[in-house]
Image: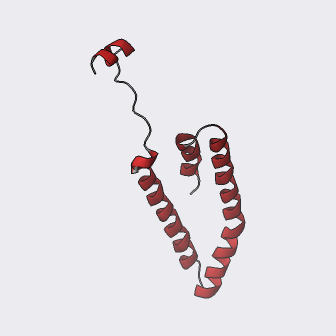
């Protein structure tokens, strides 16, 4: 569930903010690795089987995938557009 989030800090942030974003992704991944087995055990104990716990993990994964798609489509996180290929800076400036 975590790999799509590794590219987000460097896409959306620069410099020390990107380093802090990568550190946040790393810490959340480590926290998930610690808490996840407890959540699976808790749900398994309450439901009596592993189906519920794995459905809960799948729901979290689906929710995170939706968040990634929404972040990509959000104009607040849009990357600046590059100049059209094949045009030099002079022709791009004179075309304006």
Judge by depth and name the residue closer to the eye, 85 or 20: 20
The spot of residue 50 in percent (x, y) is: 59, 77
Q: Which quarter of the image is occupied by the N terminus?
A: bottom right
Q: Quarter of the image containing the C terminus?
A: top left
Q: Is residue 27 above or below residue 19?
A: below
Q: Residue at x 54, y 77 (%)?
A: 51
Q: Nearer the viewer, residue 89 or 63?
A: 89
**Residue shown at 33%/18% (left/top)?**
92
For residue 33, side relative to residue 84 (left or right): right
- Name the spot of residue 67 as percent of width and height, x first: 47, 58
Question: Residue 80 placed where, x, y %?
Answer: 43, 35
The structure residue drawn at horizontal position 67% and vertical position 78%, both measured from the top left corner, is 41
Q: Residue at x 56, y 51 (%)?
A: 5
- 20 up-or-down from 40: above or below: above
Residue sitting at the far left: 95
| Number of dots carrying numbers | 0
Q: Nearer the viewer, residue 46 or 90?
A: 90
Residue 26 percent across, percent down from the top left? 68, 52
């Amino acid at each position: 569930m975590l790999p799509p989030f590794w590219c987000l800090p460097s896409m959306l942030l620069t410099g020390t903010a990107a380093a802090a974003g990568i550190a946040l992704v790393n810490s959340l991944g480590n926290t998930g690795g610690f808490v996840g087995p407890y959540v699976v055990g808790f749900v398994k104990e309450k439901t009596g089987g592993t189906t519920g716990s794995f459905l809960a993990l799948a729901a979290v994964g689906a929710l995170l995938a939706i968040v990634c798609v929404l972040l990509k489509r959000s104009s607040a996180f849009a990357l600046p557009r590059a100049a059209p290929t094949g045009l030099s800076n002079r022709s791009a400036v004179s075309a304006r």
